[in-house]
Image (cartoon, grey):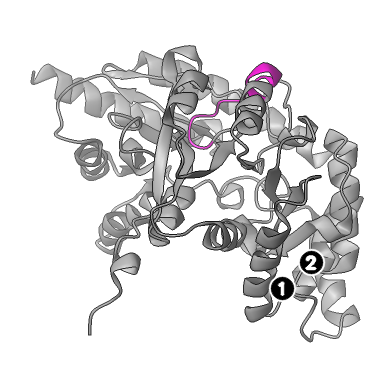
Amino acid sequence: MKASRRSMKMNYAIRQVTIPADEMEAKGAEVIRMNIGDPNKWDFETPEYFKAALREAVDMVDNGYGDSQGSPELREAITDREFEKHGARISADDVIVTNGVSESVQVLLGTMLEPGDEVLVPGPGYPSYTQYINYFDAKPVSYEQVEGEDWQPDIDMMRERINERTRAIVVINPNNPTGAVYPEKAVREIADLAAENDLPVISDEIYDKITFDTPFFSFSRTSPDVKKIIMNGFSKVNLMPGWRVGYSYFMDDSGDMDEIFEGCMRQLRARLCPNVPCQWAARAALQGPQDYINELTGKLSARADYSYKRLNDIPGISARKAKGSMFMFPRVEADLWKSDMDFILDVLWGTGVLFVPGSGFCEEFGRNHFRTIILPDIPILEKAYDKLEVFMAGRMKKV
């Protein structure tokens, strides 16, 4: 029996590369996994009061099905957070709670797109957007984030690539995989472009509190003339990746997006509800002490500095410094491999260090790059980059 064509088109590079790494480990090799942005796999821990809230939730909630849109109490807490953070004036009725941001992406794109539609996506950008656009038989159209300008979006290219089939613009800020943070000017220019073309903006802001001496400007602050859906969640800032709680909220004074909201809700009613006890704990995470975020960003900032220096000292590698998120996106300057996937596999087999190929984040603008994480502590980063440096020196010597 054959799998559907759409399912076999899915190729989520971040986890696809774990297959050869798993095979190596099964044979007894050590693998340093620099591929997945999971803070809890390193020296970051879910705050204890979150865990206490989850333990309490199991006793306090009825453990039955919950509201398909998400618990009203959590949605109220989210509105408070977004106002405190960004001044976003939304109501709990504008918020949808999902099992991670990934479900928000899937449900929203499944609602918005018909076969042949197009969506502008950042190149490079987080691959779930392109994967699900393809899954629904639509077309992702990349706009370049310019490496020489610290990965800032090319607004002129965005304008050139909009046509009558374009249905939305996706923005990922702070950016995964580049570590870029867009300045207010760029955010407002994208908003103006969207308004000119009557397009909604889907703004993924899951790293909004993870920036390094760089201010973050939320799309929620742009003109009310711009239709927008803001994506966020608890996996990164709140150190709860395995709990799978995410959310999105709609900002649309025109009412044009009302049917899109209802289409999302029809899908979410069919999947019943998000995890009920974890929603209780997520509310506690928003309402309790937030000082752990300073420790999180302090560690990541130091590790970004270290990674930037080390990567640029390695022959055949160059990198732009991360301004936020948990990632960097170095360029492979040496022209020794047929593809970035060949490079990744050669590094893996030669060193036991696992990265992600850049083309997995954009075929057009991600080639000849790889994504690395800045999550491990300095000794582990040092070990990984020592191995990469020896590997590259050996390969360059053979040229």
Q: Is residue 294 left or right of residue 344?
A: right
Q: Residues within 10 Å of mark 2 (few under 14, many from 20)?
A: many
Q: Is residue 74 left or right of residue 124?
A: right
Label pair 1/2, CB-CB below 8 angstroms: yes
The answer to whether residue 351 is above or below residue 117 is above
Residue at the front extreme?
Answer: 164
The prevailing secondary structure element of the residues shown in magenta is loop
The N terminus: image quadrant: bottom left
Let me know if residue 209 appears in the view.
no
The answer to whether residue 135 is above or below residue 387 is below
Residue at the left extreme?
Answer: 398
Q: Amino acid at mark 1?
A: Asn
Q: Which mark is residue 377?
A: none
* Circle 1: element type: loop
Q: Amino acid at mark 2?
A: Gln
- The residue carrying mark 2 is 279
* Circle 2: element type: helix
Whether the magenta-drawn stretch holds residue 183 is answered as yes
Let me know if residue 312 appears in the view.
yes
Q: Is residue 318 left or right of residue 190?
A: left
Q: Which mark is residue 275?
A: 1
Where residue 229 appears, as percent x and y from the top left, is: 69, 47
Q: Is residue 283 left or right of residue 27?
A: right
